[in-house]
Image (tube, rainbow, N blue to C red):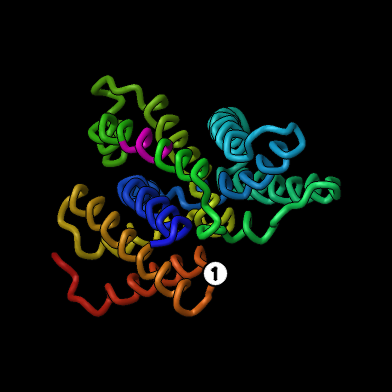
């Protein structure tokens, strides 16, 4: 197998594994719009990274984490509805990122690669970031699994039982921010959230427990990555969108199977 294809496969599989359980919480807690906001802000991180001459991946990671903290702070202190605030920040950061990039005419920028991913161009350095970020998120997610389930099922009851609800919620948002940052190279800033929610939504129809849904979402994500890469390799289609199309096809196929009670 060619090195670039092996790098792409390993990066995609690593992201799919961690996106399954994390995407399950995104679906359960209805946080898809929050993920969209962070993914749109990722382009601003890329622009700032290029401007400051630092690694775009590092800049996106730091930017997404800081925006997650800002969102939590603003949601607690401002009178606007959460979806209104998220909409303002999502489109403002995306537009600001595009404006900043337009001023750097001396820098060659593959804008389509950032917007829709460039999985087949994953380098060894990119692969190291993706594997390291995915492993970190998975370890933290395993440790936080029970508290996250508790605040998802009944937040007030979890607070009465003494769980630090605000800290756990912030931790979940930071994990989403890290995954979005490392996934940018795979599916692009406009399609990142789809890789989190589509496999999880497909698995939800046939799971009897949270653990089954998380595992099913990871397995469907793995299948979508392999199918998308195969489609890209044999039909010369863009890899990132091909993975999302494969995931959407699996979601549609899930309706053909009887739903488990």
Give the residue at x 52% y 52%.
Answer: 122
Give the residue at x 46% y 33%.
Answer: 174
Q: Is residue 212 left or right of residue 133?
A: left
1 lies above or below 123: below
The answer to which quarter of the image holds residue 111 is bottom right
Magenta residues, dominant SS class: helix
Q: Is residue 191 left or right of residue 202?
A: right
Say few, some or many: other residues with alpha carbon within 10 Å of mark 1 (under 14 / 14 to 19 / 20 or more).
many
Residue sitting farthest toward the top: 162
179 drawn magenta: no
Q: Is residue 79 visible?
A: no
Q: Is residue 208 left or right of residue 84?
A: left
Instruction: Locate the C terminus by quadrant.
Output: bottom left
Q: Nearer the viewer, residue 67 or 245?
A: 245
Q: Which residue bears the numbered disc 1?
A: 238
Q: Nearer the viewer, residue 261 or 178?
A: 178
Q: Is residue 22 visible?
A: yes
Instruction: Locate the N terminus by quadrant.
Output: bottom left
Q: Position of residue 40 (x, y in %)?
A: 62, 49
Q: Position of residue 181 (x, y in %)?
A: 53, 42
161 lies above or below 228: above
Give the residue at x 66% y 40%.
Answer: 45
In magenta, the rendered stretch is: 133-138
Q: Nearer the viewer, residue 63 or 201?
A: 63
The answer to which quarter of the image holds residue 169 is top left
189 lies above or below 144: below
Q: Position of residue 69 (x, y in %)?
A: 55, 29
Give the residue at x 48% y 79%.
Answer: 235
Q: How many discs mark residues in the rendered view?
A: 1
């Amino acid at each position: 197998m060619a090195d670039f294809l092996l790098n792409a496969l390993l990066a995609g599989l690593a992201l799919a594994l961690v996106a399954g359980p994390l995407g399950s919480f995104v679906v359960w807690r209805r946080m898809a719009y929050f993920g969209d906001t962070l993914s749109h802000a990722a382009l601003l991180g890329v622009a700032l990274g290029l401007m400051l001459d630092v690694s775009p991946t590092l800049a996106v990671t730091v930017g997404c984490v800081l925006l997650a903290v800002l969102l939590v702070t603003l949601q607690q202190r401002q009178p606007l509805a959460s979806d209104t605030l998220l909409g303002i920040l999502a489109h403002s950061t995306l537009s600001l990122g595009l404006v900043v990039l337009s001023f750097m005419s001396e820098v060659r920028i593959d804008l389509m690669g950032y917007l829709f991913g460039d999985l087949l161009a994953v380098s060894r350095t990119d692969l190291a970031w993706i594997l390291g970020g995915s492993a970190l998120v998975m370890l933290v997610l395993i440790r936080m699994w029970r508290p996250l389930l508790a605040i998802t099922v009944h937040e007030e009851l979890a607070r009465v039982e003494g769980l630090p609800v605000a800290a756990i919620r912030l931790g979940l948002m930071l994990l989403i921010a890290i995954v979005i940052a490392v996934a940018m190279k795979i599916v692009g800033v406009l399609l990142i959230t789809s890789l989190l929610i589509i496999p999880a939504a497909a698995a939800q129809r046939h799971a009897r427990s949270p653990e089954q849904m998380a595992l099913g979402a990871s397995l469907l994500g793995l299948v979508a990555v392999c199918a998308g890469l195969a489609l890209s390799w044999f039909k010369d289609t863009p890899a990132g969108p091909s993975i999302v199309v494969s995931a959407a096809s699996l979601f549609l196929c899930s309706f053909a199977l009887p739903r488990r009670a």
